[in-house]
Image (spheres, helix red, strand yellow):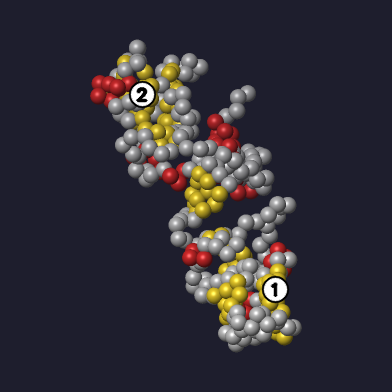
Amino acid sequence: MAITDAKKVDYLWKKVGYGATKTDTNAAKKAPNEAIASPLLLRGDKVWNQASLIPGTKPGSSAGVVTCYNTSSPQETTNDGTAAANRTWKTGVTDWIPPEFGSTYQVKIYIHTSSDAGNAASGGDQVFATGSGNNDEWFFDYQSGVVHFIGANLPNGINFSGKSVYVSGARYTGTLGLQNFSTASTGDITFTGSTISAPSNADMTFDNSGTGGYIFEGTTSMTLPKGTTAQRPTAEEGIIRFNTTTGRYEVSQDGSTYTSLRTDADADSITKDIFTGDGSTQSFTMSITPSGAENIVVYIDGVMQEPTQNYSISGTTIDFGEAAHAGARISVLHGFAD
């Protein structure tokens, strides 16, 4: 015995309306009493991951992720020979944009001489989804691109001999699947390949309001933001960056004053200049350019000299203000963290 239409409807009612499995007749178990969940399948490989780029009004011509089939160039369909004569027509292409994106995406259906798409709208017969009052409605499946004359009758007064059904509308032709992102956007954030970017001059905030931290896993490295001294950000708290002008990592509490970080490489680079006083020379040329007098250590005959009080520097020149006595040993240690 064939499955009754009532049982088919009961199955759909429970599946679609309640996301549940049909386990008994409607009389024995109403939909709210079905306990086994059966949600609709959402295929990740079919997700329109650029759907946000579909405009609310159908464009006048193909653009971006929308391919248009205007009334001047509708899609010609082919008759489905497995169904009753002229009942079902296939566009051969999928992913038509439904009216939920905007009313202008509602497809238009024309019946006209085969292989004459350019004149289908102007010279053919337009048929409407609501029919002509003769139980001759049609239904269009936007996902499969199939037109089905679902009413009891075929369109009133139409002779299908030598004719085709034409569809005017628009299709989504962007990328498909959650695994196939090339460029996608959500809010102000853009995903391009493996790059996440924010609008120009905008901050990107990762907010963890709980007690957990931020963990970056892997065995390679993490690259910090980098730029010149002139490109230092201001009015920001807790900054860390790499300064390409000085070749050093640097930090700032508030964006107004920056301090370079000392690394092992800095510690290993301490060097020494040795000069000998002659009783007349008070300035000597060092082998490096310190950032300040306080970043070098100076001894004359083993006595430490006080920065800015006993000496000053200008570029690579150290000036003692007066000449050391003849034979004095002058030691200048430099290479300390600036």
* Identity of the residue drawn at 42% across and 31% down: 140
Disc 2: which residue? 166
Horizontal side, residue 78 vs residue 297: left or right: left
Whole-angstrom CA distance, mark 2 to mark 1, is: 93 Å
Number of on-image labels: 2
Quadrant showing the N terminus: top right
Q: Can I make out residue 131 in this image? A: no
Q: Of helix, strand and loop, which one carries label 1?
A: strand
* Identity of the residue drawn at 64% across and 48% down: 33
In the figure, 273 relative to 38: above or below?
below
For badge 1, the amino acid type reads Ile
Q: How many residues crowd around disc 2 within 10 Å: few (fewer than 14), some, or many (20 or more)?
A: many
The single residue placed furthest to the top in the displayed view is 162
Q: 74 or 199, which is in the foreground?
A: 199
Q: Of helix, strand and loop, which one carries label 2?
A: strand
Q: 236 or 100, which is in the foreground?
A: 236
Quarter where residue 327 is shown: bottom right
Quarter where residue 332 is shown: bottom right
The single residue placed furthest to the bottom in the displayed view is 309
For badge 2, the amino acid type reads Tyr
The numbered dot on residue 179 is none
Q: Can I make out residue 145 in this image? A: yes
Q: Position of residue 159 (x, y in %)?
A: 32, 15
In the figure, 195 relative to 297: above or below?
above
Q: 265 or 41, which is in the foreground?
A: 265
